[in-house]
Image (cartoon, rainbow, N blue to C red):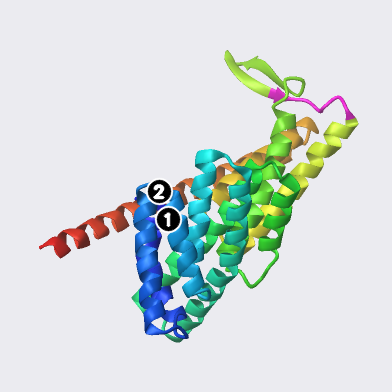
């Protein structure tokens, strides 16, 4: 099932809420263009899908569904053609729809504060937050693909530091920034001049030595320190994301390597234990997420089966 297939039904709730100022005719026509655009998208008729979604936007500019689907369609066209103009247009549309999705998430959050047990609102809140997260990630992915690294960093920093975004969204932005620092450190510690292969008890193991150049050594220390700062900010906002714990594990391993280089045996042993603990938490959360997805899939299949009967 594609992104638009998964997104259409959940966001119909958003559509009915945000089209309150539109005429009945506009609502009906907007929904028809969304349906027709979705069908065209499924058939990979991206030009036709784009036309339908642009028409939906012109009829109902204040609702996010048409613009979100337009952004995804332009993104799909870019993937097919590698036309940079389409990537630029997709980024622009994502950036227009993200504030709309954020407002909807915050509205639903307030609604939940008034009725915490409203299962329908809970599910819609989760789905819209997922759409917000995926749209933010899409901008980041496009900027990375276009090799606009400074813009990518500025984008993630903007999201991470904006307290009006949900905590899990901000946490992931911090984690992605931390992952870049981990890559920086890993590029140094995996260099053969730093990582030596030695034999201990008839087993091949790695032994780490300081980089020969002081500049490289200071860069390594800086990347680890910055990465640690960023991943701790991520965890302060969200401790339930397995990917954040994965990045935490990797950075602890880099910190352990630095301790080995500097001959800090006790710190090395402590950091090794911390890395094992972080890895265990990553494994636990990843397994829980896998089971949850299986349960949701089974529930959906049961509902579909019941609707047929």
Magenta stretch?
207-213
Please tell me which residue is depicted at 43% across the width and 65% down the height of the picture.
127
> Which quadrant of the rendered structure holds the C terminus?
bottom left
**Residue 38 at x, y percent in the picture:** 37, 58
Q: Residue at x 53, y 76 (%)?
A: 62
Viewer-side residue, 163 vs 144:
144
Q: Is residue 211 above or below residue 40?
A: above
Residue at 67% over, 17% down: 197
Q: CA distance from mark 1 to mark 2?
A: 6 Å
Furthest toward the left, the residue is: 309
Q: Are marks 1 and 2 in contact (CB under 8 Å)?
A: yes
Numbered mark located on residue 49 in the image: 1
Q: Residues within 10 Å of mark 1 (few under 14, many from 20)?
A: many
Residue 106 drawn at (x, y percent): 54, 76
Residue 45's label in the rendered image is: 2
Q: Quadrant of residue 250?
A: top right
**Frontmost residue, 131 versus 203:** 131
Q: Mark 2 Cα within 10 Å, few/some/many (few <14, many 20+)?
A: some
């Amino acid at each position: 099932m594609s992104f638009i297939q998964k997104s259409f039904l959940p966001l119909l709730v958003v559509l009915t809420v945000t089209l309150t100022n539109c005429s009945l005719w506009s609502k009906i026509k907007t929904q028809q263009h969304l349906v027709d655009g979705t069908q065209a998208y499924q058939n990979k008729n991206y030009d036709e899908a784009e036309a339908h979604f642009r028409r939906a936007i012109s009829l109902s500019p204040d609702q996010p569904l048409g613009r979100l689907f337009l952004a995804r369609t332009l993104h799909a066209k870019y993937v097919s053609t590698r036309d940079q103009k389409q990537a630029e247009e997709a980024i622009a549309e994502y950036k227009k729809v993200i504030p709309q999705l954020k407002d909807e998430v915050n509205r639903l959050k307030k609604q939940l504060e008034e009725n915490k047990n409203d299962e329908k609102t809970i599910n819609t809140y989760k789905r819209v937050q997922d759409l917000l997260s995926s749209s933010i990630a899409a901008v980041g992915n496009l900027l990375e693909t276009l090799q606009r690294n400074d813009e990518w960093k500025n984008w993630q920093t903007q999201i991470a530091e904006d307290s009006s975004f949900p905590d899990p969204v901000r946490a992931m932005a911090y984690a992605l920034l931390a992952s870049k620092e981990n890559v920086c450190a890993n590029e140094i510690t995996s260099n053969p001049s730093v990582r030596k292969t030695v034999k201990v008890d008839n087993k091949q193991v790695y032994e780490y030595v300081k980089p020969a150049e002081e500049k490289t050594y200071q860069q390594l220390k800086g990347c680890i320190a910055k990465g640690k700062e960023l991943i701790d900010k991520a965890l302060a906002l969200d401790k339930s994301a397995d990917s954040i714990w994965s990045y935490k594990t990797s950075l602890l391993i880099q910190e352990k390597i630095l301790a080995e280089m500097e001959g800090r045996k006790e710190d090395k042993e402590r950091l090794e234990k911390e890395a094992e603990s972080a890895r265990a938490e990553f494994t636990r959360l990843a397994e829980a997420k896998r089971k949850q997805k299986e349960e949701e899939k089974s529930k959906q299949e049961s509902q579909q089966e019941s609707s047929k009967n």
